[in-house]
Image (cartoon, rainbow, N blue to C red):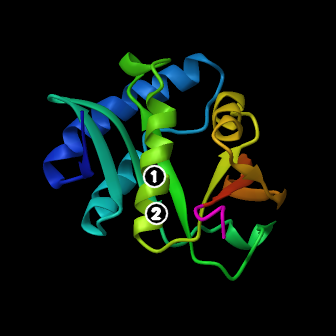
């Protein structure tokens, strides 16, 4: 498998794989993502050199973005608010690769990449009803921060999100 920064030619594969992920989430009563998020953010992520992909030959297996900011960052109490952190966003695994350890592998890749980019912490937000993701992050040594971020999408939808983080230099 090949792990690398995403390129513009990856956009069609990204949109196809994430469309399937969204359908699978909806089938499992996790109506969190839609036709706008996350797919409409991929092009900008690529331009900003913050979107990473994993391929198995020509098949997109997984992707994530590592972002310098997150709109919910001030809503929770992190272990060290002054530490440099990168935020894991738009993390998805191709449904054809479910239950094969790819998500944990990609979290390891994300931690390594964030550390190489000078981050002391990797942080993320996860919607409170996304129990499979919460379980994954807990299993991979992410610690839940105090507080909750209420992301208002529109008048009819507010997502309640927990912050999770992991220290990238735990021995320090």
Real-space Cα separation, disc 1 to disc 2, in angstroms: 6 Å
Q: Is residue 15 magenta?
A: no
Q: Quadrant of residue 43?
A: bottom left
Asked whether 134 or 155 is in front, the reply is 134
What mark, if any, has residue 110 been given in the picture? 1
Q: Indicate whether 101 appears above or below 110.
A: above
Instruction: Count neighbours of disc 1 (C-alpha within 10 A) and say few if under 14, some if 14 to 19, many if 20 or more.
Output: many
CB under 8 Å between discs 1 and 2? yes
Q: Could you tell me what secondary structure mostly forms the magenta stretch?
A: loop
- Asked whether residue 2 appears in the rendered view, the answer is yes
Q: What x and y, as percent, mark residue 70?
A: 59, 67
Q: Residue at x 40, y 67 (%)?
A: 116
Asked whether 52 or 101 is in front, the reply is 101
Q: Indicate whether 168 appears above or below 144.
A: below
Residue farthest to the bottom? 82
Q: Classify the position of the N terminus by image quarter.
A: top left
Asked whether 61 or 121 is in front, the reply is 121
Residue farthest to the front? 171
Instruction: Count neighbours of disc 2 (C-alpha within 10 A) and say few if under 14, some if 14 to 19, many if 20 or more.
Output: many
What mark, if any, has residue 114 been given in the picture? 2
Question: Label 2's element?
Answer: helix
Q: Quadrant of residue 13?
A: top left
- Asked whether residue 147 appears in the rendered view, the answer is no
Magenta span covers which residues? 168-172
Question: Label 1's element?
Answer: helix
Q: What x and y, as percent, mark residue 77?
A: 82, 68
């Amino acid at each position: 498998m090949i792990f690398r920064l995403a390129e513009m030619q990856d956009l069609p594969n990204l949109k196809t794989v994430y469309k399937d992920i969204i359908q699978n989430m909806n089938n499992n009563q996790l109506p969190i993502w839609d036709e706008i998020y996350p797919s409409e953010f991929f092009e900008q992520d690529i331009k900003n050199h913050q979107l990473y992909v994993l391929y198995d030959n020509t098949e997109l297996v997984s992707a994530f973005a590592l972002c310098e900011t997150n709109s919910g960052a001030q809503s929770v109490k992190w272990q060290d608010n002054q530490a440099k952190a990168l935020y894991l966003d738009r993390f998805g695994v191709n449904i054809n690769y479910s239950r094969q350890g790819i998500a944990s592998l990609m979290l390891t890749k994300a931690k390594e990449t964030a550390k190489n980019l000078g981050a002391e912490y990797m942080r993320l937000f996860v919607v409170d009803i996304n129990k499979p993701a919460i379980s994954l992050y807990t299993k991979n040594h992410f610690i839940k921060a105090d507080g909750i971020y209420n992301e208002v999408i529109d008048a009819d939808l507010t997502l309640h999100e927990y912050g999770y983080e992991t220290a990238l230099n735990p021995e320090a």
